[in-house]
Each structure stands twice: as C-alpha cells, then as structure tokens.
Amino acid sequence: MCGRFAFWNDKNKVLAHYALEDAPDFKTSYNITPSNEIPAIRQGQNRELANLHWGLVPYWARDTKLKPINARADSIFKKPFFRDSIKKRRCLIPANGYYEWKKVNNHKQPYFIKLKDQELFSFAGIWDAWDNPNGTLQSCAIITTESTPATADIHGRMPVIISPDDYDAWLTDGGDRFLKPYAGEIEAWPVSTQVNNPRHQGENLVHPVPVQ
C-alpha cells in the first residue's frame, strides 16, 4: 500500500515538470498522511492542477464512511467503487518519495523510498467529485501494484509510478498497461521513527539513520 509520502517541490518546478501554464497554491510536506489535501494533475480542457482530499469518495456515495486511500491495480477495473473513476477520471499525484515499514527486531522500521534518476515523479491516481449539502468534495486515491525486487523485502506492494513520457497517454486514455511495477532503479534507506507521528515535519524525516 501507500499510506505516507513526501512532496516538497515548489510551484516553478511543478509547472515545468507537468507543462502547466499556471496552478493554484498547494501544500508541500515531508510527512503527508491520509485525509490531507494533496495536489493532483488531471486532464480537463487542458492539463490542470487541483487540490484533492486524499481518500476517495465516489460521486454516487451516500456518505463518507468509506474513503480508501489506495486502489489495487489488479482489481480496479472490476470493483464498482473504483471502476468509473479509472475509466474516466485519472490523475497524476506528485511525489518525491514515499514511506513503508518493515518488521525489524520486533518493531516496524520506516524506510524512505525514491527513484534513483528522478527527484520529482508521479503516482498513478484516480479522482472523483462528491456533491453534498456542504458543497463538493473532490477526492483521490493512489493506485498500487506488486513491489519491484528492490523494495519487496520492505513491503509487498508499491504505488504505480507513471513515466513522464506516459503522462499524456495515462491522463487521456489510461489502460491496464500502465498498472505495473516500476521498471527503473529505486533507492531505499531506513529513516527515523519520528515519521510515525504525523505532527513531525521537516527534511530530517528523509535523512538516513541506522536501523533501530
């Protein structure tokens, strides 16, 4: 799964990376948790950035009791909860890396995982808009798949990562050909257990530490 990630790039970097003319302000954090508002790039008349609630609520939902943060690639086209979004409302979720936990010495050791050749990259995501008496909740989920060999000993699943060369095709056409483990090089190292607490922020959270 993907339940915690980091994104720290500024607006100019994001505009250039995603070929956007402009974008609303967005939040960055070294410790992004579910239910946070996160930036996502989607296709309207043009490519645009929107701030979305992390935890998907489909347009047809009666309430917000169920808000999954992840959707499994192997079942996303079959499950009614995700089926409409994967066909019609795909997005890219900017990230600089993500966290997973591995059982080490009778406790869970957090690891920071990133791409070796890209500082800024994109998770595959889906989004939806739920109208309710208080307005419209726009929300999203990150698609996950099986881990690559580089991260399999940390966790059995990982986010689907979309190559920049595939951004247009993913946003406009989609398809299960994108929903596979990342083929490039990945780096991972142990980090402080401070990341376990969402209140802890700061660049030190992604610095390597000895296994604790």
Image (cartoon, rainbow, N blue to C red):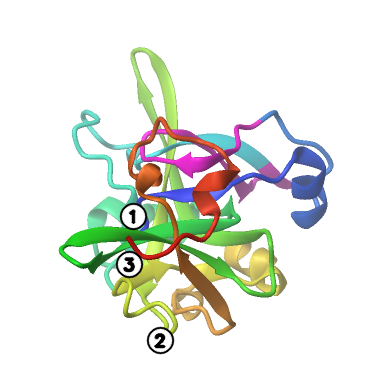
Q: Is residue 127 left or right of residue 22?
A: left
* Contact flag, marks 1 and 2 (Cβ < 8 Å): no
**Rendered location of residue 27, percent (x, y):** 60, 32
Q: Mark 3 points at which residue?
A: 77
Amino acid type of the residue tagged 3 in the rendering: Phe
Q: Name the residue under label 1.
A: 70
User: Crowding at label 3, few (<14), some or many (≥20) Cα neighbours within 10 Å?
Assistant: some
Residue shown at 32% from the left, 60% from the top: 212
Give the mark, 1 or 2, whose residue is nearer the N terminus: 1
Residue stretch in magenta: 26-48
Residue shown at 40% from the left, 30% from the top: 199
Q: Name the residue under label 2.
A: 149
Residue shown at 43% from the left, 23% from the top: 136
Of badges 1 and 3, the one in the foreground is: 1
Amino acid type of the residue tagged 2 in the rendering: Pro
Q: In this view, does 103 lie above or below 178?
A: above
Q: Quadrant of the N terminus?
A: bottom left
Query: From where the camera sits, is residue 201 visible?
Result: yes
Q: In this view, does 50 lie to the left or right of 118?
A: left
